[in-house]
Image (cartoon, rainbow, N blue to C red):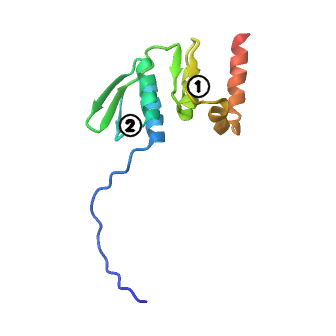
Amino acid sequence: MDALVYPSFVKGEVNAPPSKSYTIRAIAAAMLAAGKSTIINPSSCDDALAMLNIAHSFRAEIKFNNQNLEIQGGLKSNPEIIYCNESALTARLMIAIAALSENKITITGSGLSLIHISEPTRLLSISYAVFCLKKKQKK
């Protein structure tokens, strides 16, 4: 079978569907940033909404602007409890962010287990490093 192919140009715009994982990570980064961050076309899944609630509990200013999300971060407060819903990614990120605080912060959620939270980090020995840091603080 022969086919003739002619040179041509493709023109247009593609809107990719929002990513749950990228949205959660972007919200975490925006929480840490001192200035205003804009997340374009964020996911509105339950896990991303849990992360937004956490950002709000750290006193981040959150505005919805059309299809975008604007977050003024800076970690202005330290909540005592961080509820991650069922998002293991959110729990893993919040362990690192909570370690920045000098206050005790409890990270909890529904349907989460230590296996979900620690398994992706197990091979990198991060779980062990967190354990060592906690042990050192108690002395």
Q: Which residue is mark 2?
A: 44
Q: Which residue is mark 1?
A: 95
Tell me the quadrant of the picture where the N terminus can be found. Answer: bottom left
Q: Amino acid at mark 1?
A: Ile
Q: Amino acid at mark 2?
A: Ser
Q: 83 or 94, which is in the foreground? A: 83
Tell me the quadrant of the picture where the C terminus can be found. Answer: top right
Please, is residue 105 above or below residue 13 in the view?
Answer: above
Residue at position x 43%, y 44% in the image: 19
Residue 22 image point, x, y percent? 46, 40
Please, is residue 76 above or below residue 72 in the view?
Answer: above
Q: 34 or 13, which is in the foreground? A: 13
Residue at position x 53%, y 31% in the image: 86
Residue 132 image point, x, y percent? 73, 22
Q: In the rendered view, does 115 fall on the left or right side of 12?
A: right
Tell me the SS state at disc 2.
Answer: loop
Q: 59 or 9, which is in the foreground? A: 59
